Image (cartoon, helix red, strand yellow):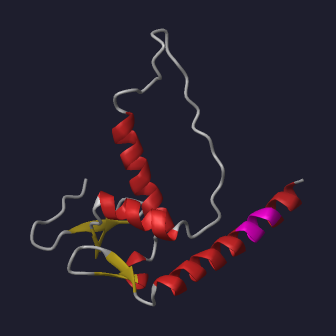
Amino acid sequence: MAIASSNTNCKPCYSKKGTCSKKFKKVVPYEEMERLMNVYGALKAVRNRSAKSSKNEDGKKEGEGKGCQVKRESIKRKFYRWFPDLEQRFFRTEEGQYQPIHGHEQEVSYRKQMREKSFESVAQKRARAN
């Protein structure tokens, strides 16, 4: 478990195998994650998935009460998938907001282009599978 240091607001990055690296990643506030996701969107083609909810005997949805925490963690994971190169493409302002280095319009067009490329790749894979 990584703990953000108080003076640098950074947490250590870990590789998938669990080994520690010396590279540090900045901690992005949750509200800023939501803002960036709403403004710029995904880097790859977004799949339409509907959340499956089942009800228990009381008529309440399963997981109700802890759903807010699960959703928050899910959004954090999605954010880092959507912004894998945050440090290279964005800079942090004094107010704590992240702004694109090359400008808003260029970032929007870059992401649109990458989504189209990803969509074409997925379509080709589906065609080969059928």
Q: Which of 84 and 72 is in front in this view?
A: 72
Q: Which residue is drawn at 45% across and 90% down?
A: 102
Q: Residue furthest right?
A: 130
Q: Residue at x 62, y 40 (%)?
A: 50
Looking at the picture, does residue 87 appear above or below residue 126?
Answer: below
Residue 118 location in percent, x, y? 69, 70
Residue 100 location in percent, x, y? 41, 83
Query: Quarter of the image holding residue 68?
Result: top left
Q: Residue at x 41, y 84 (%)?
A: 88
Q: In screen coordinates, is 44 left or right of 129?
A: left
Query: Quarter of the image holding residue 17?
Result: bottom left
Residue 19 location in percent, x, y? 34, 64
Q: Which secondary structure is most common in the magenta stretch?
A: helix
Q: Which residue is drawn at 31% across and 59% down?
A: 31
Q: Which residue lies furthest to the bottom in this view?
A: 102
Q: In screen coordinates, is 93 left or right of 108?
A: left
Residue 42 location in percent, x, y? 55, 66
Magenta region, residue range: 119-123
Looking at the picture, does residue 38 appear above or below residue 52?
Answer: below
Please tell me whether residue 2 belongs to the stretch shown in magenta: no
Q: Nearer the viewer, residue 18 or 107?
A: 107
Q: Which residue lies furthest to the left in this view?
A: 7
All told, the count of numbered labels is 0
